[in-house]
Image (cartoon, rainbow, N blue to C red):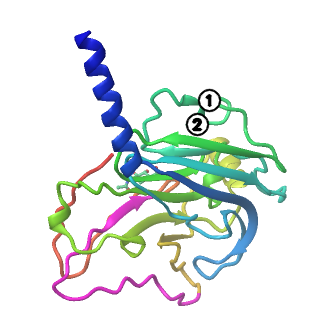
């Protein structure tokens, strides 16, 4: 009798909690080929909703993500099947939604769709997503997932935390990934990127003076920068001129 009462109580509490906080967060990823020029050099790419980096995913820890991937890829220079991995998110009891092609799912074939259903189960923080089919993410299918915790113990440390304070660092190549991969796998040197990008903009040697990413700040205000390494191969050193950095690490 006692245990029955307490389990009713637990159920009641859970119902209140989910009614207040949990939401179904829906995103549509139209994955298609498109020409982009992050560093001024135009090339075809594999893009989420036409942009590099892909659409920013924003949620809170009690939410369940529903991300519908519509595979509209057609360009034979790059991989045309796809799958998406949600890097950093634990998939307790949802391994089928993790993304690695040939491991937890079949690739999504061109012209087909798949909806990833991912209950966040209380996970917060800065994560990212990328294609998990061969080297396809090198061609552009990379983006960021921000799960903001309304009860973040560090809330008092910053005034601003929004889409403008997400900083992605990525390497970029002028040639499609399958060709680069083939050369590398044949025993040649590691691939050297043509440029590095910050929020999808960069410059290459001998290229045009592309307008770099600008993040406007107000002196005296505190900004939470969510710096994400969306690199395919290269390592990065990140610094802010005239400031010292004490990074908080999240993996
Ligand atoms: C960033 O990502 C690349 C590719 O996975 C990796 O080689 C590098 O070590 C990472 N870290 C830094 C700090 O650049």
Residue 153 is left or right of residue 169, and the answer is left
Q: Which residues are magenta?
A: 208-229
Q: Position of residue 79 (x, y in %)?
A: 76, 50
- The residue pinned by badge 1 equals 104
Q: How many marks?
A: 2
Q: Visible in this render: residue 236?
A: no
Residue 2 is left or right of residue 216, and the answer is left
As drawn, 191 above or below 219: above
Marks 2/1: CA–CA distance: 8 Å
- In this view of the protein, which residue sits in the foreground, 118 or 103? 118
The image quadrant of residue 29 is bottom right
The residue carrying pointer 1 sits among few (fewer than 14), some (14 to 19) or many (20 or more) residues within 10 Å by Cα, namely few
Looking at the rendered structure, the secondary structure element under dot 1 is loop
Mark with earlier residue (2, 1): 2
Looking at the rendered structure, the secondary structure element under dot 2 is helix
As drawn, 135 above or below 162: above
The residue carrying pointer 2 sits among few (fewer than 14), some (14 to 19) or many (20 or more) residues within 10 Å by Cα, namely many
The image quadrant of residue 160 is bottom left
Q: Quadrant of the C terminus?
A: top left
Residue 20 is left or right of residue 134, and the answer is left
Q: Residue at x 76, y 64 (%)?
A: 33
Q: Visible in this render: residue 207?
A: yes
Q: Position of residue 60 (x, y in %)?
A: 39, 53
Residue 30 is left or right of residue 171, and the answer is right
Q: Give the mark toward the camera: 2 or 1.
A: 2
């Amino acid at each position: 009798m006692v245990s029955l009462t307490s389990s009713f109580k637990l159920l009641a509490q859970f119902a209140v909690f989910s009614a207040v906080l949990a939401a179904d967060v829906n995103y549509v990823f139209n994955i298609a080929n498109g020409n982009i020029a992050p560093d001024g050099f135009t090339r075809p790419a594999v893009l989420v909703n036409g942009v590099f980096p892909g659409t920013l995913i924003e949620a809170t820890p009690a939410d369940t993500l529903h991300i519908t991937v519509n595979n509209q890829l057609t360009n034979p220079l790059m991989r045309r099947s796809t799958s998406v991995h949600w890097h950093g998110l634990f998939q307790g009891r949802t391994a089928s939604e993790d993304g690695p092609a040939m491991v937890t799912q079949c690739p999504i074939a061109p012209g087909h769709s798949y909806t990833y259903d991912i209950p966040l189960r209380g996970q917060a923080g800065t994560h990212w997503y990328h294609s998990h089919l061969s080297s396809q993410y090198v061609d552009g299918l990379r983006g960021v997932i921000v799960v903001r915790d309304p009860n973040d113990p560090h809330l008092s440390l910053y005034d601003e935390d929004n889409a403008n304070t997400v900083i992605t660092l990525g390497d970029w190549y002028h040639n499609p990934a399958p060709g680069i991969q083939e050369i590398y796998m044949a025993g040649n040197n590691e691939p050297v990127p043509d440029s590095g990008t910050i929020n999808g903009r960069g410059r290459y040697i001998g290229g045009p003076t592309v307008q770099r990413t600008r993040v406007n700040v107000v002196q005296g205000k505190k900004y939470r920068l969510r710096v994400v390494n969306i690199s395919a191969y290269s390592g990065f050193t990140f610094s802010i001129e005239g400031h010292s950095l004490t990074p908080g690490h999240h993996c």
